[in-house]
Image (tube, rainbow, N blue to C red):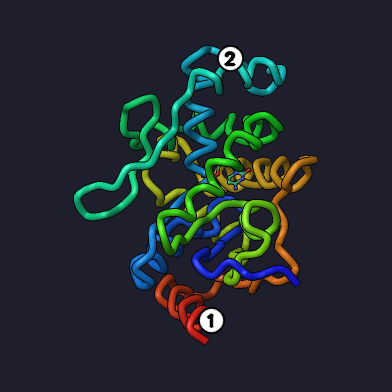
Amino acid sequence: MSEKIKNVIAIDGPAASGKSTIAQLVAEKMKAYYISTGNMYRAIAYKILENNIKAESAEEETFEKVLSNIKLDFKKDSDDNLIMILNGKPLGQEIRKPEVANIVSYVAKSPAVRKWLLDKQRSLTHLGLIVIEGRDIGTVVFPDAKFKFFLTASPTVRAKRRLKQDGENASDATVETVSKAIAQRDKIDSNRKIAPLKQADDAVLVDSSNMNKNEVVEYIVSKINT
Ligand code: DC
C-alpha cells in the first residue's frame, strides 16, 4: 500500500453542502491553510466570461488559449490566510456572481482546465497542513490523503444554505430555483468523464442535514485526531 499523505485533509461533496464553511472552520481548529478548489475553477470561469467565450460550446483549444494567459497564485495575507491572485489581482466576491456560477460546471468539464489546475493543487502541499475542499480531492487530486471526508446534505437544506450565502443569490432567487440550479450543477459534476463528483471509497461520509456547523466540525476534527 502506498504511503498516506498526512498533511492533507480532503473534503469533497456536492454544491452547497457546506464544504467551504466547514473546511474553513476545520482549518482554523487544526491551524491549517484553507484552500477552495471550486474557487480555482471559478477564477478560470471568470476569465472565460471576461473573454466573452461561451463555455457551454467552447473547444479545448479555446480553453487552452485562455489558460495560457492566466497566472493563478496564492499569497498569505497579514492574518496568514491564503488569498488567490489572478493575473496579479486579488480575487474577491466577483467569482461568486450568478454569471460565473452558471458556467463553472462547463469550465470544470474541460480536460485542459482540470489538468492545469491539478498540477497547481498538488503543489500546494508545500504550504504545510492544508484543508482542501472540492469534488475530486479524495479521488483524484490526493488519493493518498490520510484524512478524507465526503460532506453532503439534502437538496432542500443545500438550497436554503446557498440562498443565505452572499453573492450567488440573485434578488429573485427562491428555494425552488436555487434547488434546481444546484441539481443541474450536481448532474453535470457527477456525470462528467474526468474526475466526477464521487465519494472516495475510504472517505468518511458526513450527512449534515440535521447537524449544525459546530457539530460537523467537532465530528471531523475528532475523526482526524483519533
Ligand atoms: O465548490 P463550488 O460550488 O464553488 O465549485 C464550483 C464548480 O467547480 C462546481 O461546478 C464543480 C467544480 N469543481 C470541480 O469540478 N472540482 C473541484 N475539485 C472543485 C470544484
Q: Residue furthest left?
A: 78
Q: CA distance from mark 2 to mark 1?
A: 44 Å
Write down the residue under mark 2.
53
Q: Is residue 29 above or below residue 98?
A: below
Q: Quadrant of residue 192?
A: top right
Quarter that holds the N terminus: bottom right
158 is higher (above) or lower (below) than 52: below
Q: Are the residues at dot 2 and dot 1 in contact (C-beta closer than 8 Å)?
A: no
Element carrying mark 2 = loop
Amino acid type at circle 2 is Ile
Name the disc covering residue 223, or none. 1
Q: Which residue is at a point 22% across and 54% down the rendered structure image?
A: 79
**Residue at left offset 40%, top offset 36%:** 73
Quadrant of ligand 1: it is top right
Q: Is residue 202 above or below residue 58?
A: below
Question: Mark 1 is on which residue type?
Answer: Lys
Viewer-nearest of discs 2 and 1: 1
Foreground residue, 36 or 161?
Answer: 36
**Relative image position of residue 151 (x, y in whole percent):** 59, 65
* Mark positioned earlier in the residue sequence (2 or 1): 2
